[in-house]
Amino acid sequence: MARLQEKVLTSNFNFKESPFKIKYRKYLHAAVDILSRLKKYPLAFVGLIVLVVYFLMAVFAPFLCPHDPAESNISIRLKPPIFLGGDWSNPLGTDSIGRDLLSRIIYGSRVSLLIGVITVSISVVVGSSLGAVAGYFHGRFDALLSRLADLLLAFPFLIFTIGAMAFMGPGFWNLIIALSFKSWVEFYRLVRGEMLSEKNKEYVEAAKALGQNDFTIILSEIMPNIFHSILVLATLRLGYLIVAEASLSFLGLGVPPEIPAWGSMIQSGKNHMMNAFWISTLPGMALVVLVLSINLLGEGLRDILDPRLRID
Amino acid sequence: MLQIRNLTSVFPTDSGMIKAVNGVDFHLKQGQIVGLVGESGCGKSATMLSILRLLPHPGKIIQGEVLFEGEDLLKKPLSEMRKIRGRKISMIFQDPMTTLNPVFKVGEQIRESMVIHGFFKKDGWNGFDFFRRRRKRKEIDKVISLMEEVGIPSADLRYYDYPHQFSGGMQQRALIAIALACNPRVILADEPTTALDVTIQAQILDLLRRINEEHGTGIILVTHDLGVAAEFCHEIAVMYAGRIVERSKTDDIIEDPKHPYTQGLLKSIPRIVKHKQKLYVIPGSVPDLLQMPPGCAFAPRCVYAIKKCKEKNVPLTEIEEGRYVRCINYI
Amino acid sequence: MKGIKILERILLAIPIMLGIAIIIFFFMRLTPGDPVDIMMGKAGMVSKAEIANLRKEFNLDKPLHIQLFLFLKGLLKFDLGKSFTKGMPVMELIKETLPATIELALFAMMFALIIAIPVGVISAVKQNSWIDRFAMAGSFFGISMPHFWLAIVAILIFSVKLNLLPTQGRISYGVELAHITGLYVFDSIVTGNLEALIDTLKHIILPAVSLGSAMAAIVARVMRSSMLEVLRQDYIVLARAKGLPEWLVITKHAVKNALIPTITVVGLQMGVLLGGNMIIETVFGWPGIGRMVVNAIFARDYPLVQGVVMFYAFVYITANLIVDIIYTVVNPKIQL
């Protein structure tokens, strides 16, 4: 790692490169730097690895699954997993209508990660761009948006999302809209606050004196400096959003029932806790491990990059 | 009365032991004021905290003795130590803004000191709590008269104020009242005026001097300002990098400083003179306490340093009656 | 002077309430078609006249701004509309289910604070000891665990495997209890009904613990970090230099300071408590507001959902207002 870092850092820096390439290199430096510092936080590193494994699992789901997750076979319903006396054809057993649990759990990671990542991306893009503009220009637009942000923050997250889903009905995109509707505010507040404090610093003054326009200053001067705070917040929010998605699916308000999601799997197993507890506990474990590792990574990143950022 | 012998305190860190206090020897006689002078970071505050055994974690005292009224404080059990803190030896801290607890009324904080040391029991309180209100009233009156004594105006009203409602000078007076609450034998004043305005500094020092004269309280005054110490103390000990480098009567030190570091300090005191004169600056900087030179700690900055200085450390030696210097040139 | 500050806070909450009402109102209009269409679409076989009547009853025939005006006017009179499915005013339904929810929330909060504050204090005092590490690992788990998952695990262990505690409802069938306040634990204490007291306590343990543990986890962490911050302060050294015994230094001088930032976090956590309450009540069949609103969502009872969400927002804002006021009272630095 250290060698890679050295290589990137010492590669000759050419001022004639396009601004895009320079910017790109800045982020590359940051990424390599973060990775090498993560080594000191073994738990966060484990979190990162687990997260990568989940991502691979989600991407290659069709190749990993022994069965079609939707295929039901009543004759093998409630089959126990291998460690409770089941067999290898359904390593983690089957659910109440005989669907293979392992395949459903693997496919369930797709829903959780897709919804989490898409929502976080929307929130980051919307929240940071609005926050950047509001913080940098700090005018009427800022006043208006900040009022809206206060309003949205006056709602508890889950209640807002449940309410929104109640009116929009279950659905993949509906869920993303409902989650994003409030989630961008955190990023807005973060970036706006950072903008307010960064924009008076000397390097911004210098860029202004050089005659750069405002948007160039925001994008290529200030943003790289607050990038790490956004990264930390995004990681921590990802865990929270995955929990929110699972909670909604658990209530039957998330993705439609035909898509395998961990939350709805736990819900469907609830009625079989007496005789087949694995139906709800195994997807639950998958969820908890994912959320734990994301949070471990997030807290590690926070300790490294931005110790003063604390969201509760 | 208070005698410190070979006191050594360390702070273990990731990169090694920091010897904040390194074999410090000095003593305070009854009713005396001793100044402990040195640059910031030379271990003056750590010495004070070591005397009361209040070094913040992970600092610890590894050797030496602190003899108070014939007993070694370092060997006492903690419960005994608590009876001395605030009762026999109390301390005034550097920054009054952060030293008073923000959530308690100032008067209550002063009263607390008296209460924990059973100071009110003497006033005819027999252990039964029949007249709690009246007793409390009496206690409050006593605190108020103490507040008046340290120069807090309209003390009967100020008793009920919170610390942030006090100005810096008033906060320091309140802290002095806390230190004085149980009429201690010794007050350790750790840079009591550094955080204050110059005019208020003089008032606080006057107050301390009055306390010293009226109550016969011994005071150890820690300061980085040799001028203040010269004006105020009977004896001065100069500290450098955790060690005492010179110690003697104030007049001797001011008129005839022996140690090169003391000489440098004296030269660098700004004086009001007619001609603009460049201020003297001791060359170099304080050594890293993690990488102390083997010989005299001051040698790298010393104009008189000879080869031997860097090889061997010399002890604090009495060169004349009551004059102690740690320098090879005087042996 | 503090009075003015508090009054200012209360006045500031009013526009926020208004804004929330408007957001909820427009969210409801986001539904494709209008609620009556959707509701009746399922029932089928309803005459056009009936639909028109319903529209009129719910003011859906009037222009949007009039609807908004009527909605806000109703709110002023604490009129949250009328439930489609139950035919009762929403406010009545909330009143009916409120005690169950309050009881659960109170127990969850009590559990959280009673556990979290001492744990936070001890962890900070014994920083990096095994107690600290264990407590912080526990609170990390607590933060990462979804409410419903904790509830499921709790049911699995304490009911299914150990058969110790009931999993559904507030009181066993056949246990008699006079209803005075609707808070069953309180009622059974007041009436001296020991059987009912034990039974209701058994019922409330699992839901309260599952609901409160996330709050406990966060409060413990915040308490720990603010204690660590406070213990570094000069006034702690002064307290020691005064000769105070260590336990007094901690409990009197440190804890009171450390509680101030913690109070704010408790207020923010009220939101988590309210959201979790919907899920926990559903899992444990707890007859409170949360379960009612989840049922209402599936019954497409829009006025009820709208009313309850409005109510939740109101509770959340009020709770934070109360926390703000406590903060103002406790913190001597806020004076003007």
Image: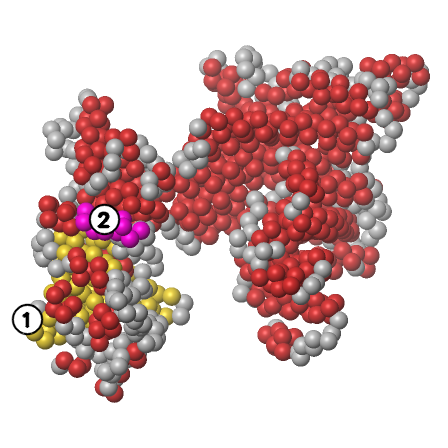
Q: Nearer the viewer, residue C186 or C77?
A: C77
Q: Where is residue A1 in the image (x, y as percent from the top left)?
A: 61, 73
Q: Is the magenta stretch mostly helix, strand or loop?
A: helix
Same-chain check, marks 2 and 1: yes
Q: Position of residue B271 (x, y in %)?
A: 25, 65
Residue B116 visible here: no
Q: What stretch is highlighted in magenta?
A: B197-208
What chain does mark 2 sit on? B
Tag 1: amino acid: Glu
Question: Which secondary structure lies at badge 1?
Answer: loop
Q: How many marks?
A: 2
Comparing A157 with B171, the one in front is: B171
For image coordinates 41% across by 67% down, the residue present is B14
According to the image, label 2 marks what residue?
A: B204
Specify the subunit that label 1 lies on: B
Left of B147 or right of it: where is C30? right
| Left or right: residue B237 compared with residue C325 | left
Residue depicted at 33% across the width and 40% down the height: B166
